[in-house]
């Protein structure tokens, strides 16, 4: 029995020299783009570090990171308040957004809802990511803050003896900025988690059903553990977004240069500090702002390294 290739001598799978040249060129082009991204990132880091060098030389690392005074008049700068505010708001935002985002991803990836309802909901969740941050800030000022003023005041009056709620809420503060951040990163977590859940091999689900597992047992013990690396990646990507968010946080956090254990107190973040002061800064203040930006750059880099480490560990365990 002869094959189609044998019966038709004009058909050939041998690749031409032109095709090989095109493939080789495409390979080197993609490498060039990849190296270009790395070089661009390194160039940004070096430029920020060079502009921050005067502040680094004057204040060092410990004094700048632990200092709480930001005084342009006397040229005394410390970024602990902003670092603290960045970490706290991002942590609270994740605490609120991760369970909600994962729940939304489960609802939109499983057949809990009719398809004609599920598809519009998927589109609406993804549409949340396209809303400008300044719109979130305005919504927080005029809608969310007045709505939460009563409940937050009750919490302060009832549990004010706890340092976490010791400051009277004023409509601006760490708590309202954290809630807005949670809303902003929710579509990132939900969308990436949903894609990870949908991408799980259907044969795993059928095998679990075949072994007698219920729907929820299959979801909790098979589907989510299989998709966990993608879910973690989405959470870490959302954390990076929360740490770097500027306008909405600047409008809502209060921009107070003093750290406080209370989430009702006003505070500041590195991004908010840059947005408020960079336009009018000069001299050592510019270098100090660039130093703060460098610290934010390093924090974001550490988040991404942690994400890669966690994902790699999860993949190894799955194997």
Image (cartoon, rainbow, N blue to C red):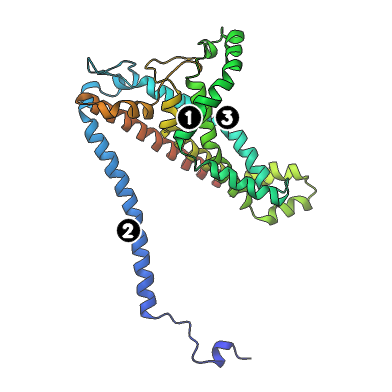
Give the residue pinned by disc 3.
Answer: 96
Q: Position of residue 313 (x, y in %)?
A: 52, 42
Quadrant placement of the N terminus: bottom right
Instruction: Give the residue number, with chain letter if any, for mark 1.
Output: 138
Is residue 228 visible in the rendered structure shown here?
no
Residue 165, percent from left and from top:
54, 13
Quadrant in which residue 6 is drawn: bottom right
User: Mark 2 sits on what residue?
Assistant: 32
Picture coordinates of residue 188, whole percent (x, y): 53, 41
Left or right, residue 242 beside residue 74? right
Which callout, 2 or 3, points at the residue further toward the start of the chain? 2
Mark 1 vs mark 3: give the one in front.
1
Circle nearer the viewer, 1 or 2: 1
* Secondary structure under the numbered disc 1 in the rendered image: helix
Q: Residue furthest right?
A: 212
The image's mark for residue 317 is: none
167 above or below 101? above
**Mark 2, other Cα within 10 Å: few <14 / some 14–19 / many ≥20:** few
Neighbours of disc 3 within 10 Å: few (<14), some (14-19), many (20+): some
Between the residue at mark 1 and the residue at mark 2, the CA separation in whole angstroms equals 42 Å
State whether residue 79 is above or below residue 128.
Answer: above
């Amino acid at each position: 029995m002869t094959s189609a290739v044998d019966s038709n001598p004009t058909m050939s799978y041998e690749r031409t020299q032109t095709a090989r040249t095109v493939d080789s060129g495409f390979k080197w082009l993609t490498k060039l783009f990849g190296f270009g991204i790395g070089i661009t990132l390194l160039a940004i880091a070096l430029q920020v570090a060079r502009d921050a060098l005067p502040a680094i030389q004057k204040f060092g690392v410990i004094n700048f990171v632990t200092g709480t005074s930001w005084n342009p008049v006397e040229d005394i700068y410390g970024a602990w308040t902003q670092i603290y505010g960045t970490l706290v708001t991002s942590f609270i935002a994740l605490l609120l957004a991760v369970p909600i985002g994962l729940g939304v991803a489960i609802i939109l990836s499983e057949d809990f809802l009719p398809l004609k309802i599920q598809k519009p909901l998927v589109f609406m969740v993804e549409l949340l990511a396209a809303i400008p941050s300044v719109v979130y800030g305005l919504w927080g000022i005029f809608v969310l803050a007045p709505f939460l003023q009563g409940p937050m005041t009750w919490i302060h009056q009832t549990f004010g003896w706890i340092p976490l709620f010791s400051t009277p809420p004023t409509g601006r503060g760490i708590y309202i900025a954290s809630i807005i951040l949670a809303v902003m990163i929710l579509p990132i977590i939900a969308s990436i988690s949903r894609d990870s859940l949908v991408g799980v091999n259907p044969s795993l689900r059928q095998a679990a059903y075949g072994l007698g597992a219920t729907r929820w047992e299959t979801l909790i013990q098979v589907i989510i553990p299989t998709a966990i690396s993608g879910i973690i990646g989405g959470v870490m990507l959302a954390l990076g977004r929360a740490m770097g968010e500027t306008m909405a946080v600047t409008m809502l956090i209060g921009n107070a240069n003093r750290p406080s254990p209370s989430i009702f107190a006003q505070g500041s973040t590195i991004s908010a500090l840059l947005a408020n002061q960079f336009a009018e800064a000069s001299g050592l203040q510019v270098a100090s702002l660039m130093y703060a930006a460098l610290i934010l750059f390093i924090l974001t880099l550490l988040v991404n390294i942690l994400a890669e480490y966690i994902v790699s560990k999860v993949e190894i365990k799955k194997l």
